[in-house]
Image: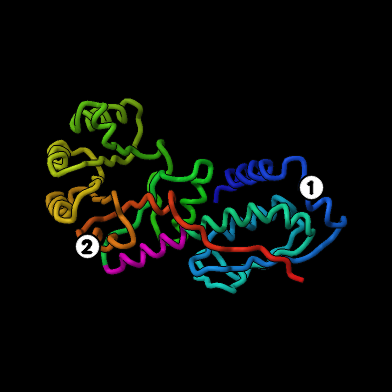
Amino acid sequence: MDKQLIHHFITGALAEDVGDGDHTSLATIPGNTTGKAKLLVKDNGILAGVELALQIFKEVDSNLAVDVFLRDGATVQPGDIAFEVQGDVKSILTAERLVLNCMQRMSGIATRTHQMVELLKGTKAKVLDTRKTTPGFRYFEKWAVKIGGGVNYRFGLYDMILIKDNHVDYSGGIRQAIENTKRYLAKNQKELAITIEVRNLDELEQVMQVGGVDQILLDNFGFDDLRKAVKRIGGRFLTEASGGITVDNIRQFAECGVDYISVGGLTHSVRSLDLSLKAVK
């Protein structure tokens, strides 16, 4: 857990939401009113964001007391109660929407990831996330992927080399892109893993001849060509499939023998889990 990053996120999110005060709560609720609220699950799925919620409550009011009944990664169903929070009612209401916004989205991502991971059982393939994330919320979306059983790919542009189609085209071809990369890493004394994307079997053959990479991303390959590609690579490099992958076809991609399957839909278009924070009377 990156506590500094989480702290900056929470303070920024609260500043955006609260402004110069929660005037509705200040207007309607007498001072020093205390109470209790419960995090109610209204959907089936995998719970995520509990640890983040604890940090949010702590940032809002360190005197709030939270009793946790369900941890991150728990399988949940309608009617489950994840936790109860007790203390100053205005503090609870200040934290409410930020807690729900984060937990609903993180739980939706964890749920979709878990679904895909389960579909791959019996194969060697692992589910990867991508950089197709919500700006400013990437850390938490990738956290949710891990809770759901997936694998985090690169976090940003800085922690690995991923030579995609545009890089290949702008650099003048596959050989030039790889050779440029190797020179850059040597000159700057950087040790970064190299993945290169290929769009067809001809480009794959060029990579096989040049070498110098760690992983090959086979983008938008049909199943027949994907099987041919995996056989041609023969374990020399790690393999990754991407493009058009859904819960309906991910198993077929895995059965082609790839090591990884990257799914942008884990984070860019997932449905949030229905959760609610309700007063306990």
Q: Quadrant of residue 35?
A: bottom right
Residue 252 in the magenta stretch? The answer is: no
**For the magenta stretch, what is the residue range?**
109-122
Total numbered labels: 2
Query: Is 242 placed above or below 168 here?
Result: below
Question: Which residue lies at the image location 75% right of the left edge and 66% below the top edge?
Answer: 36
For marks 1 and 2 on the same chain, the one whose residue lies earlier in the sequence: 1
Residue tagged 1: 23
Q: Residue at the spot x=49%, y=53% of the render?
A: 143
**Residue under the point 40% across and 39% down:** 159
The quarter holding residue 96 reads bottom right
* Left-right relation of 21 to 53: right
Q: Is 231 located above or below residue 173 in the figure?
A: below
Res 255 label: 2
Q: Is residue 183 left or right of residue 51?
A: left
Residue 120 belongs to magenta span? yes
Q: Position of residue 276 (x, y in %)?
A: 63, 63
Placement of 157 over or under 256, stated as above or below: above
Q: Residues within 10 Å of mark 1 (few under 14, many from 20)?
A: few
Look at the magenta stretch and give its main secondary structure.
helix
Q: Secondary structure at mark 2?
A: loop
Would you place residue 29 above or below residue 123 in this image?
Answer: above
Q: Position of residue 232 (x, y in %)?
A: 12, 50
Foreground: disc 1 or disc 2 = 1
Residue 170, percent from left and from top = 26, 27
Q: Residues within 10 Å of mark 2 (few under 14, many from 20)?
A: some
Q: Quadrant of the C terminus?
A: bottom right
User: Which residue appears at 26% of the width and 50% of the height?
Assistant: 240
Distance, label 1 to label 2, CA atoms, is 57 Å
Please tell me whether mark 1 sits on a helix, a strand or a loop.
helix
